[in-house]
Amino acid sequence: MPQSLFSEFQVSPNTTLKNRFVKAAMEENLANDQQLPDKKLFNLYQQWADGGVGLIITGNVMIDKWAMTGPGGVALEQTTPLAPFKKWAEIAKSNNTKVWMQLNHPGRQVFKAMGGKNLAPSAIAINLGKHSNMFSIPQAMIEEEIQDIIHRFGQSALQAKQAGFDGVEIHAAHGYLLAQFLSPLTNQRSDQWGGSLTNRARLLLEVIKQVRAICGADFDVAVKLNSADFQRGGFDIADAEQVINWLAEHNVNLVELSGGSYEAPAMQGQSADDRTLAREAYFLDFTEKLVQRSPIPLMLTGGIQRYAVAQKVINAGFSLCGLATALAYRPDMINMWFKTPEFRLRIPVITWSNKTLAALATMAIIKRQLSRMSLGDTPKLTDSPFLSLLIDQIKKRRRTKRYRRQLRGSSQLP
Ligand SMILES: Cc1cc2nc3c(=O)[nH]c(=O)nc-3n(C[C@H](O)[C@H](O)[C@H](O)COP(=O)(O)O)c2cc1C
């Protein structure tokens, strides 16, 4: 029998969600200059908690403050002061909402302008055609650096637990470090961390083992995984099925399925291998078999902006529906749907022929809404993509300068 979107879901022995709607991770770039959450993030998360979702997954939080996906991001290390994180968790948990912190390491997806560490399984640069010079060639990681990553994920997860988060989601999708290890296109190592799928998945599984060992069984651990990279020769759906089985053996509570990377932004509905992705719930047809066979609960994210589509996702066997873009425009979307399931937003789609710029403008226009909400203003559906991209670039430049100044003053980098 299909489940109601407003029915409870027990995701782990400790955590029961009040409904099936999840605020998926969105990097906000709203941290203060110590890379900590403060008033702006608190305002934003209060709106999402009030808006009716059962679970909030934070924007990605970096496990190493010198390896950042972007300027203005949050970092949580072993020695980071916990007070602002406690406040963040407390706000996100209001209105009977649960909260997981997403933990991430960018690997090679670090903009050249940012500087800092640029590490990857192999020294293979990002290929974005004429925009490739936004990134530099990463350094292939040595064993000590791999061990450091495992240690850091464990310590950041422990910090999240101590701050009051209900769990963590380990980001192993979208072309970041753990996804780079999983993909044969970016991982060409010949040691125990590369080659067979067993070896390519080793880092992710070691991270999970470490987090479980340090945080115990009474803390939720989820993974965001690509159903595929959507690039020829990349991590594919058969790999995803095997990895989900391994994650289940390691007591992971839930896997969120997404897809793509900076090179192939399938999470925005674009594939690089000629596959056509649906306009709504992009990965639903593609992941049908995964959901039928998965031994653990799955969540689907990508292109869910209508109640009827969310219901289709649950009817297909997914336990939870992740929404990002829709909640950037309407943080109270779930409350709206509770009263009026037909309620629909007309979110503009950017159809520029330059796919890289279109992807950047899409991110910029959504982040502009997050920024508005962080200041207590209301999102707007009528922003110009071009102007939003320009504003984003100006803000990015300013924040990047600030970050680089700190980087220069740091004694932690070689
Ligand atoms: C502004 C923005 C920031 C994002 N940041 C993250 C992130 O930090 N971690 C992550 O896993 N996904 C991130 N995503 C991807 C979303 O979680 C989601 O997978 C994607 O947007 C598709 O869902 P949607 O169609 O509901 O937006 C981000 C998306 C947007 C638009």
Image (tube, rainbow, N blue to C red):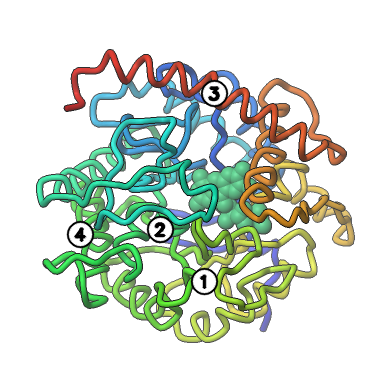
The mark found on residue 191 in the picture is none
Q: Amino acid at mark 2?
A: Ala
| Dot placed on the residue nearer the N-terminal end, 1 or 2 | 2
Circles 3, 4 touching at the beta carbon (< 8 Å): no
* Image position of 74 (left or right of 343): left
As drawn, 311 above or below 356: below
- Location of residue 378 in the rendering, given as x and y in whole percent from the top left corner: 80, 30
Q: Can you say whether 266 is above or below 325 in the image?
A: below
What residue appears at the point 25 percent right and 68 percent down from the top-left corner?
A: 200
Labelled disc at residue 397: 3
**Mark pair 3, 4: CA separation:** 36 Å
Answer with the quarter of the image where residue 351 lies. Answer: bottom right
149 and 377: which one is in front? 149
Residue 55 makes an appearance in the image: no
Residue highlighted by disc 1: 230
> Mark 3 vs mark 2: which is more N-terminal?
2
Of the 4 image quadrants, the one containing the N terminus is bottom right
Give the number of the mark in front: 3 or 4. Answer: 3
Q: Is residue 2 above or below residue 76?
A: below
Q: Which mark is residue 206?
A: 4
Amino acid at dot 1: Phe
Residue for badge 2: 222
**Is 196 left, or right, of 287 in this rendering?**
left
Look at the numbered discs 3 and 1 and tell me whether their residues touch, using CB distance below 8 Å.
Answer: no
Say which label, 4 or 1, has the lower sequence index. Answer: 4
